Amino acid sequence: MVVHEPGGNLDELRRSVREWCATHIPKDWQDQQRGATNDELVAFLRWWGAELRATGLLVPHWPKEWGGGFSIPEQVVIAEELARGGAPRNGLYHVGVFNAAPTLVHSATPEQQQRFLPGILNGEVWCQGFSEPNAGSDLASLQTRAVLDGDNYVVTGQKVWTSWAQVADWCMLLVRTDPEASKHKGITLLVVDMHSPGIEVRPIKQAYGASDFNEVFFDEVVVPVDQRIGRENDGWAVAQGTLAAERAIFILEMTERLRLNGIEAAVREAAGWRLESGEPALEDAGVREAIAESYAEAEVLRHILNAMIENVIRGVDVGGTSAIIKIFYAEVIQKLMRAVTGWQGVRGQLDEPLLECAGWETGFWMNDYIHSFGHAIGGGTSEIMRNVIGERMLGLPR
Amino acid sequence: MSLTVEERDELRSTARSLCDRKSPSERVRAVVADPPGFDRALWDEMVGLGWSSIHVPAAHGGSDAGYAALAVVLHELGRAMVPSPFLASAVLATSALMCSDNNALASELLGALVAGGSIGSVAFASTDGTYEVSRLTTGWERVDATVRLNGSSGFVLDADVADVLIVGACSDDGTPAVVAIDSASAGVRIEPAASVDETRRLFSVAFTDVVVAEERMLCEPGARAEELLDQILAVGVIAAACDATGATERMLDRTADYAKDRMQFGKPIGSFQAVKHHCANIAIAVEASRAAVNAAAVALDGEPNAWARNASVTSSYVGPACTEACGFGLRVHGGIGFTWEHDSHLYLKRVMLDEVMFGTPSWHRRRLARTVIESVQEEELQRS
Ligand SMILES: Cc1cc2nc3c(=O)[nH]c(=O)nc-3n(C[C@H](O)[C@H](O)[C@H](O)COP(=O)(O)OP(=O)(O)OC[C@H]3O[C@@H](n4cnc5c(N)ncnc54)[C@H](O)[C@@H]3O)c2cc1C
């Protein structure tokens, strides 16, 4: 098998990844995964993660010693080609690869890195236990308690909306260690073994029918002190370790999926039928305009991402742009899904088997539309992102 | 005889309290999980209360209170997302018969529908969901003194429980006809086509050499049949918009309540202007939709030649406005709004089906544009 290495020629890398995609992405994976059970989905994503790993493409953005080392331009090429090739979206490993690892690289001790990073590469699943029933947008008001007892923290509390907790091996957990301190000050980041006694995971079904987020209950769960990342009560700063570059590359891959596969799917959808008036949909001005509008917006988003990535390389602060790309992406997908369900009319309202792990372009447009609301809520709502732009980027008063 | 404002308010409050008691959302979820997918006892109760015939002339046993009264009921059924054959039977089939020129047939079938012994539905969409008469996918031909149907119709509401199906068909030479058949007739095959909105029950209906007496035609084939189908469509559009308005109004209530209760950053989220404005925008959509559907329902009590225009105005505005409003309502609920357990998605899905069930807003806008442009041009001609 070809193993991709950093440091070569960019065009060569592109050619090689493209060829690898062409030969390794199962042609019919979407059909096979349509209507899959949760277990089948997880097994498939584990298999796909292992394939990516074997060819060196699971963690291009990690440091070289941990299996990555690709430059940002190389990461862009890889993301583009995986998107173009219609690769499955590996949501199962998202937290491990994109959130936990950068935080570990940034803030963990060498021993902790040695302990956890190889596991992520080997297919251990991570989840992110941040949100709580009363701490969503106002994350810093979280209440899950950790009390130090000798060499262990004892954790009690509840998290919610925890994606993939039902199969996770590890959790990046934000806990309150100092209830007296001001709310941002008394928080600590722990890595919790999800197989520990005292943890109960209850799946929550989502509006579009999948069940991949959960409630997680902690009842006196023992977590060794050496699983604390960073200093005690410094967890708020440590948790911000998800770097702008990773967010940009992740959204870039999603944007390319939309710009290439999503638009292609919309064209294919429209090509197959006539509007109610009898006119071929593809000849209709409204349909053509909607396709072009979404394509243009996806391309503009690509340009924002390119500029952002250049700034990351130059070390310029891109905090505000991070919020902009999140909102922009959410709105582009919503607009396209809405447009297509609009032309489909009542046909588009028929139920179909669910396809997960394909981004928002599964071809079941109505469901993709409902699913797209998750992007305007999860990871910081669009309203909160707009506050960030107003306050941090423009300095508007709070 | 139309209802006074007071009578309408009373009807609304009776309907709301019945729906609150008999069809809270937990009940809706339970009912749709098992066959037949609606609450037959509640349906019987609604028929008994005269809701399903509230707009039917007294001569046929109805209350003669007009579509304006029917709109009140539809709004409440939408608010509570009641799964029932009301739209199929009380609205579409009943209206088709009320518009029919075949008095004997209308009397016979309306009698049974009003009394509640019988459920009706209308099959007048093609298999790909269009209502353009020339594109219907059920054909008809005359064989001696009978009509023979072949083909299939899509998106037929509650077909499996309908006793009477009113079928829109188009002959090979492009002549439309509307005929009432017994759903148990030989050659009728009914298959479920589940919608994303679980509170609705859609079916496709196939016809293989279904033979029915000529006297079962609702009107003369041809231009009159086309007009009749258009009238049923107009009633459907306006009824679905009433339903969507009711559902969105409920979403507004629940969203505003949630914005008052849910605390983040030490305050109710409704105190953040972003959330307040989302709520206000939903309120604008609800207020405007309510005004639009009420006016459209009043128009249904008037001249039928104004129905299509009113239906298109309604479809153009109400469907998209309610869909957008319910989407924002879902978002104001944050993570909870994105769960299956919460009702946000039920409202959104119901409203989205309402939006396109009787033609997309885009198609209706095109129809409306034709009417508007023609009338402006005519006026100009007359002036010059
Ligand atoms: C699909 C999905 C996956 C998720 N996965 C995870 C996960 O793996 N781990 C995890 O920890 N969390 C996860 N979350 C949780 C997510 O981060 C929270 O849902 C989100 O932060 C919002 O919090 P909330 O749900 O409590 O909503 P709330 O904070 O209660 O917000 C409700 C509404 O109020 C608005 N609002 C609140 N405060 C303000 C303000 N100051 N100004 C303006 N508007 C405001 C919000 O924008 C929203 O519209 C996930 C969520 C979703 C939808």
Image (cartoon, coloured by chain):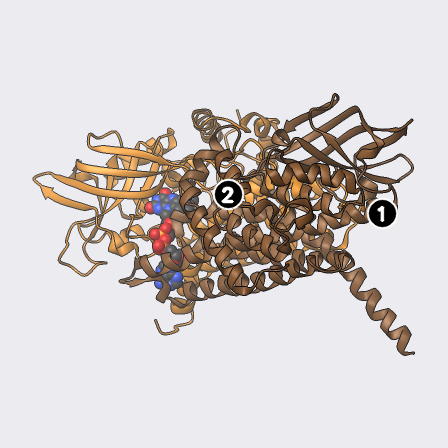
Chain colours: A orange, B brown
Q: Could one spot residue A123 in this view of the protein? A: yes
Q: Amino acid at mark 2?
A: Val
Question: Which residue is situated farthest in the left direction here?
Answer: A150
The residue at label 2 has a CB less than 8 Å from ligand 1: no
Q: Amino acid at mark 1?
A: Arg
Q: Could one spot residue A264 in this view of the protein? A: no
Question: Which residue is situated farthest in the bottom direction here?
Answer: B384
Residue that appears at 74% across and 59% down: B309
Considering only order in the chain, which callout, 2 or 1, is on the residue closer to the N terminus? 2
The foreground one among B290 and B346 is B290
Residue that appears at 69% across and 46% down: B95
Q: Which residue is mark 1?
A: B224
Residue A394, by quadrant, is: bottom left
Report how far apart the C-alphas of labels 1 and 2 lie in the structure.
34 Å
Subunit that carries the residue with mark 2:
B
Examine the rendered structure and indicate whether residue B26 appears above or below residue B312: above
| Residue B295 percent coordinates (x, y) | 64, 63
Q: Which residue is mark 2?
A: B82
Residue that appears at 50% across and 60% down: B9
Subunit that carries the residue with mark 1:
B
| Residue A209 percent coordinates (x, y) | 47, 36
The foreground one among B37 and A298 is B37
The residue at label 1 has a CB less than 8 Å from ligand 1: no
Q: Secondary structure at mark 1?
A: helix
C-beta proximity under 8 Å, tags 1 and 2 = no
For disc 2, the neighbor class at 10 Å (few under 14, some 14 to 19, many from 20) is many
For residue A392, side relative to residue B227 (left or right): left
Q: Secondary structure at mark 2?
A: loop
Q: Nearer the viewer, mark 1 or mark 2?
A: 1
Q: If the image is split into quadrants, where does the C terminus of chain A sit?
A: bottom left
